[in-house]
Amino acid sequence: MPSTLFVLMLPAALWSLGLAMSRDEKLKLRDQVVEMFDHAYQNYMDHAYPADELMPLTCRGRVRGLEPSRGDVDDALGKFSLTLIDTLDTLVLLNKTVEFEAAVRRVLKDVRLDNDIVVSVFETNIRVLGGLLGAHSMAVMLKEEGQHMRWYQDELLHMAKDLGLRLLPAFNTSSGLPYPRVNLKYGVRGPETRTGTETDTCTACAGTIILEFAALSRFTGDPVFEAHARRALDFLWEKRQRNSNLVGTTINIHSGEWVRRDSGVGAGIDSYYEYLLKAYVLLGDDQFLQRFNIHYASIMKYISQPPLLLDVHIHKPLLPARTWMDSLLAFFPGLQVLKGDIRPAIETHEMLYQVTKKHNFLPEAFTTDFRVHWAQHPLRPEFAESTYFLYKATGDPYYLEAGRTIMDNLNRFARVPCGFAAMKDVRTGSHEDRMDSFFLAEMFKYLFLLFADPEDLRFDVEDYIFTTEAHLLPLSLSTTPHVSSVPPNRTIPQSKQELDDSNFDWTCPNTRLMFPDPAFPRNLREPIRSAVDKSCPRPAAYREPGMGAPPLRAQDFMANNPEHLELLRRMGVSLIHLKDGRVQLVQHATQAVSPIAAEDGVRFMQEMMELSSQQQKEQLPPRAIQIISHPFFGRVVLTAGPAQFGTDLSKSSAGVRGFVTVAQPYSGCEEITNSEMVRGHIALLQRGQCMFAEKARHIQKAGAIGGIVVDDSVGSSSDTAPLFQMAGDGRNTDDITLPLLFVFYKEGNILLEALKEYSEVEVLLSDKARDRGADVQQAEEDFQTEATAPTGSESEVTAEDQGAAPAEGEDVGSAEDVGSTEDVRSAEADVPKADSGEDEERRDDADGAGQSVDQLLADWRDDLEAFRQMEKDEL
C-alpha cells in the first residue's frame, strides 16, 4: 500500500476548555525559541568549533583524548565536528538559510571522516550520517528554490556515502547484527582497530539503522546499506521471545542469545520500536508495520500500566523487572500518536509532565512513586518531542503551556553564559560541563514547530519523517526502487501466519469517535496529576514474626558512639575506617558472645545493608551552593553535602547569602586569626585535622554566617564519590546555629579559582538552586550600570583588588589519595553514614603547596566525569 505519514488532526472540539493561546503569544514564544537556539549555537561556534561538543561551563570545546574519558559516552565523539553536523537541518527549519549555507561550506572544508578513532556505530549513524542526509535533503530543497545553495553538487551526500562505507565493516558478523563500535579508519579487524572484540550490543543499537541506511541507499542507488540494515532487523525479529513477542535489552551479536532479558520502551530498546513504525512510513514495506503492531500489542499488554511504562522479563512478562523508569521512554507518547493510539499517549505524557513540574526536568530515572532515582538530566529532548506530536494530534493549547514550561525551565536553570549546561542534579540545580549535540539537533526543532504557524516554515514538514535524532528524510524516498544485494538470514521463516493481515490494523482510528467530549483529554489528565502530587509512603522493613527487635537498630547506629561500638563487638561485628571517611562493617558469627547475639548481628547487618542500599539510591538529598556575584549571577551551582547540625537549609525558604572568605587557619581547627575578615561572611575551610563540628564552632565564634568545607582528597568529585552528611563530635551540637556544607575537591576548585580571579565572590547556600530572582537580576543590572560609567579612581582600585588573591588559598595541603576498597567476605555493608572528618598526614612541603594552586587551575578546567551506571544502561 502507498506510504503515508499518520498525523492525526483532531477537531477543535477536542481542545481543552481553557482559553487558547493567542497568536501573538505563540509568535513571541516562537521567537524566544530562536533566541535560545542562537545562544547555544553561537557559543558552540565561538568557543568550541571544530571540536565535537561545547563544554558550556568552561567555555571550550570537548576534544576526545584531551579530556578525561567518560567511558561509553565519549564513543559519540569522532573528531568530526559532531555538533555542527547534527545541527545543519535545524538551521534550515529555523529559517537560517544563510547560516546553513556557511555551515555546509565549513563542513565540506574542515571535516575529515578518516580519523583513527573508535566510535559508536549507533551514535555515528543517527547523529552524523543522519545529520549529513538531513542536510543534503535541505540543500536539495533550497537549491530547487533557486535562492540558496545553487553551487551545491551533492557534496554532503558523497560524505554520507563515505561514512556509510566506513560503518559497513561493523556488520561483518554471522548474525548480521553490527559490532557496537568501529574504527573509522581501520574498521573492526586487526590490532590497529582497537575494537572488534565486543560480543554484546543493545537492541536499539542494532535496530536503529534502517532509516539512515535505507535513505543512503535510495539517495545513491547503492542497495548494500539498506540490505545490511534489513538483515539486522530480520535477525532481531527472529530472536524475539515467541510467547511474549518482546525483545530483551542486550543481545550477543554472534549467537543471538539475550544477555539482558528485561524489556521495556526506554534505554536500550526505545528506538528499535520507533524505527519499525517509521520504516513502514518512509519505505512503504508492510512487513515493518506488521512487526511493529505485534510488538505494540505486547507492550500494551505487559509493559503499559497506565500511566506507567515498567520493564518486565521477556520470559515472564507478568513479572516487573524494576521499580523505576528512565527518561528515554518519554519519546513513547509521540510514537503512540504516530500509531494513532491517543488515549495512553495523553496519560503517559501527563505523568511525565507532572514529574517535570515536580523536579523542573525529567530525572534520568525516577521511581514509580515519582521520586528521583538518578538525578541527572542531560537536556534530553524526548519530552518536548512527545509534547509537539500531541499538540499536532489534538490542537489542545494545554500542550503549548507544557512547551512554555520546558522553555522556562531551560532558561531559569540550565542557561549559562556559554550556552546551556546539563543538570548534574535536578534536586539542587547543579550543572555538568556538558551540552550534547542532540540538544541543538532535536530540542529546538520540536519547540519551534510547537509554536510556529505553517506560514513560518520554508517547507511542509508533512513531506518528511523525523529520525530518532530529528533529522528530516523525505517521504519521496518510498517511491525509489529497492533491490537487495545481501541475502537475508536463511533461518528467518516467512510463514503465511506472519503475513496475515488479521494480525494488525492498517489504518488509524477515527478520532472523531474517540473523543466526542471536548473535556475528555482533561478528564484523562486530572487523576494522573493527583497521583503524582501525592507523596507515597515507603513500606516498613519486613521482620519475621516473633523474632523481636535487635538490641541496636541500623538507623540509630553512630560510628563514634562507644556504647554502639560495644554492642557491635558483642554481636561479632567489627568496624573498619576507610580512607574516604566512611566505615565498613564486617560480621563474623563465631566472634559473637552468644548464638543469640550472633543472630542479632545477622539481622543488624541485613538491616544495615538495606539501609545502605536505600540511602545510595536516594543519594541523600544534597544542598546547593549558587554563585550569584559577577560574572556568574546565579548561573553556576555546585552540589554540596549537608551537616547533621547547624541550620537546616531544607527548612529555610531564603537560604543563607554572603561573601566567601578563606579562613585562617585554612583547616579551621584552631581559633580563627582573621576574624575581622570572616565576620559576616561565609568561611571557606579545608577538610581534615579535626571534627566538622569543631570547625563550625571556630568560624561561628569568629562571626561567620556560614561555612563551606572543601575536601582535601585531590581529584574527588560529586560525580564519582557519594555525598554524605557531616556528623557532630558526639557532644550536644545545639550551640551550632550556622549552616555548614561540604563540597568535594573539584567543586571546591571553582570557588577557590573564583576567589583568585575576582575581588569578591558572593554565594547562596540553600536546599536547591534558586531562580535568578529580582535580587540577583538587580545585582547584574547594577554591575552592568557601574561597568558602563566607572570613575578613574574606581577603576584603579578594582584592578589592584583583583590582582591580589588570598594567601591562605595557596597554602593547601592534600590528604593521601583514597584507595579502592576490596570486597570483604561474609556479611558486610558500606555505611554512607556521617563522616568523622579525621585527617590523614600531610605530605606536601612548601613547594608542593605552590604546585597545588596550579593543580587547582588545571583541575577546574577538567571535565566532570559521567556516571558509570548510566553508561552501562546506555542512557
Image (cartoon, grey):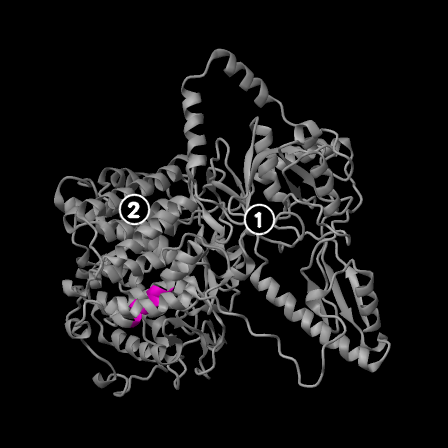
- Dominant secondary structure of the residues highlighted in magenta in the image: helix
- How far apart marks 2 and 1 lie (CA) works out to 45 Å
Q: Position of residue 305 (x, y in %)?
A: 38, 76
Residue at which label 2 appears = 88
Residue at 71 percent of width and 34 percent of height: 702
At mark 1, the secondary structure is helix
Please identify the quarter of the rendering in which residue 67 is found: top right
Q: Amino acid at mark 1?
A: Leu
Seen from the viewer's position, the closer of residues 585 and 771 is 771
The magenta stretch spans which residues? 344-351
At mark 2, the secondary structure is helix
Seen from the viewer's position, the closer of residues 119 and 320 is 320
Could you say which disc has been placed on residue 814 in the image? none
Residue at which label 1 appears = 649
Quadrant, the N terminus: bottom left
Q: Residues within 10 Å of mark 2 (few under 14, many from 20)?
A: many
Q: Position of residue 213 (x, y in %)?
A: 31, 62
Q: Position of residue 369 (x, y in %)?
A: 47, 68
Q: What number of labels is visible?
A: 2
Q: Amino acid at mark 2?
A: Leu
On the question of residue 274 being in view, the answer is: no
